[in-house]
Image (cartoon, grey):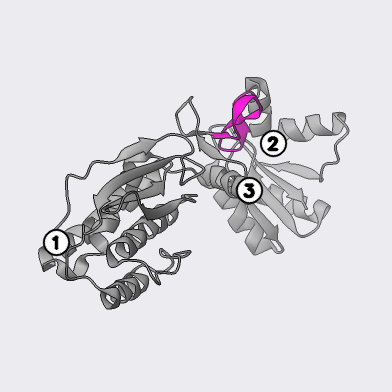
Amino acid sequence: MYLAGLQFRHHPGATTHANGPTVSINLPLDWCGDNVDDAHVVHVVARLGDAYPGWLDGLPSLDFVLPGQALALVATYWARGLLNSRRGVVLDAGATRATATVLHLWVGTHVPKLSANALALGLNAVRLDGMDALACNRLVAQVGTLLDQCGTLHPDYIARVLMIGAADTGIPFAPSPFGNRTWQYGLGRRSRCFLEATPLDDSLTGTRIARNKLLTHDLLPRLGFAMPRQVQAETAEQALSAAQQLGWPLVVKPADRGKGKGVAVGIRDSEGLRRAFSEARAQRTAGDRATTGAR
């Protein structure tokens, strides 16, 4: 049987079981049927571990846990692994007995709908042995679709770096009230909201300056900051000439792009410089030039 039509609840803040936003669901203790024993749980963990390496990392010991709760735990950690495989920084997952006959399951979230779908898939994934081939194929297809959605809606790579740092230092983070893939770090009046690595209270002028490598390189020394030498190049030949002035190794980047697009580091020869310059030009905006700098 394939589980469908499950009703999840979204918790936008901390709960008894988690420090950040989660989605949750309550299920009967015997939700997986009467024919599940400890050996079956071990088999499921091994099978999912082989099929989806790394997705069950952090799974707690299932010793002395009833089979229904054990499979629920596996489902939540598998769902967390799915979400984290596409730039997620989901920390929370678990399943506990709310009452003698009811389980409470939860998994952390960046986008509630995605986490709810991941947990629904997890609850089906731990029951693969009871499915026919059609249901198994359906599950695999839905996993692929959900991974694509996570790739579109989850934090980008820069925001993910901030989230990992926040997690390492115990700072809570969650989607910010401003939406549009902005994220809040911390709570209360000392919290800050960011778009990628840019604070939302940063000025528009500051953002534009930060995107312009030539203007930034001119401005920062005036403020007393040390800067590496930099040469502007409009052609590969100019870049090669700049290399003779600057020496190796070099960094090449478009003059007006962000997010690390078109940036190449550690360039140590002419062939690598030509290749890096070509890639930088491909990323540049209209009228932009590439810059070459020593590191």
Which residue is at 29% across, 67% downward?
67
Q: Is residue 261 above or below residue 192?
A: below
The residue that mark 2 highlights is 213
Please name which of the two marks, 1 or 2, marks the residue nearer to the observer. Answer: 1
Labels 2 and 3: the sequence-earlier one = 3
In this rendering, position of residue 11 left or right of residue 248: left
Q: Nearer the viewer, residue 6 or 37?
A: 37
Q: Amino acid at mark 2?
A: Lys
**Mark 2 residue element:** helix
Q: Residue furthest right?
A: 224
Quarter placement of the N terminus: bottom left
Image height of 213 relative to 25, above or below = above
Where residue 14 appears, x then y in whole percent? Answer: 49, 38
Q: Secondary structure at mark 1?
A: helix
- Binning the other alpha carbons within 10 Å of mark 1 as few (below 14), some (14 to 19) or many (20 upward) gives some
Q: Which residue is mark 3?
A: 165
Residue 281 appears in the picture as rendered: no
Q: Is residue 12 left or right of residue 135?
A: right
Find numbered disc 3 in the image and state the secondary structure of the residue it sits on.
Answer: helix
**Which callout, 1 or 2, points at the residue further toward the start of the chain?**
1
101 or 208, which is in the foreground? 101
Task: Tell me the magenta residue range.
Answer: 184-201
Say whether marks 3 and 1 touch (CB < 8 Å).
no
Q: Quadrant of residue 208?
A: top right
Q: In this view of the protein, which residue sits in the foreground, 231 or 228?
A: 228
Would you say residue 49 is visible in this rendering?
Answer: yes
* Point 41% across, 65% down: residue: 56
- Pointer 1 residue: 135
Residue at 58 percent of width and 50 percent of height: 164
Please, what is the three-letter code of the amino acid marked with disc 1? Ala
Q: Relative to 164, does residue 40 appear above or below in the rendering?
A: below
> Is 77 left, or right, of 287 in this rendering?
left
